[in-house]
Image (cartoon, rainbow, N blue to C red):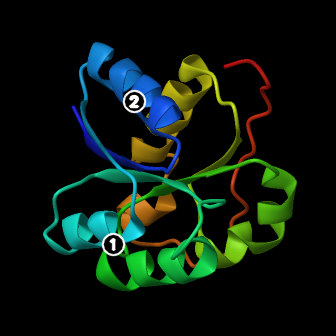
Amino acid sequence: MARVMICDDDRETAERLASALRAAGHEAETCRHTMDVLRAAAAGSFDLVALGLDMAGFGRAGAVEALREIAPRVPVIALHERPVELMRAAAQHGFAAVLPRSVEAKSFLYAVAVALSADSNPRARGRNNGNAPAPVLKTNVG
C-alpha cells in the first residue's frame, strides 16, 4: 500500500482522513506546516501528498511549486474551501485531484486510488506535461 502525507492546518480533518487511509491499509502521517511536508518529500518518504491550499502561511502556489521541484513524481491532492478557484491553476500545477472541504473519507480514498493508479496517473508514468485538468470531486458532507 501507499505512504501518504496529509498536510493541513485543520488537525481534525487531517486525522480523519489519515484514519480512513490506515483503515484502507495505507500508511498515513499528518503535519500542519508545509515545511514539514517539503522535508519529507525531499527524503522520498511519501508516495502521495494531500495538501490544504487554503492554509495560513507558506501555502498555495509557493508550496506546490516547491513540492514539484523537490518531488516531481509525487501526486498531489489539493484540499480547498473553494475548489473552483483552484481549477484555474490545476492544469499548471498538475494536481491529481482537487477536493472541497469538508471532504468525505470515501471521496478522499477514491481520489487517492485514482492518483496512485499508474494507468490513470500520467505523473506516475513520468509523462504529465501539466496540461491535463485535475478532477474535482464535489461533496459537502464530512
Of the 4 image quadrants, the one containing the N terminus is top left
Q: Earlier in the sequence, mark 1 or mark 2?
A: 2
From mark 1 to mark 2, how far is it between C-alphas?
18 Å
Out of 101 and 26, give the one closest to the viewer. Answer: 101
Out of 42 and 60, give the one closest to the viewer. Answer: 60
Residue at position x 25%, y 67% in the image: 41
**As drawn, which residue projects farthest toward the top?**
23
State the mark number for residue 35.
1
Of the 4 image quadrants, the one containing the C terminus is top right
State the mark number for residue 108.
none
Marks 1 and 2 in Cβ contact (< 8 Å): no
State the mark number for residue 15.
2
Residue 72 placement (x, y as % from top left): 37, 76
Residue 44 placement (x, y as % from top left): 16, 65
Residue at position x 42%, y 83% in the image: 66
Q: Tell me if mark 2 has few (under 14), some (14-19) or many (20+) residues whose alpha carbon lies within 10 angstroms of its own.
A: some
Indicate left or right for 7 with 60 as reference: left
Residue at position x 20%, y 75% in the image: 42
Residue at position x 83%, y 71% in the image: 88
Secondary structure type for disc 2: helix
Secondary structure type for disc 1: helix
Q: Tell me which corner region of the image, top left, top right, bottom left or bottom right, holds residue 75.
A: bottom left
Classify 50 as above or below 40.
Answer: above
Out of 133 and 76, give the one closest to the viewer. Answer: 76
Indicate left or right for 54 with 6 as reference: right
**Total numbered labels:** 2
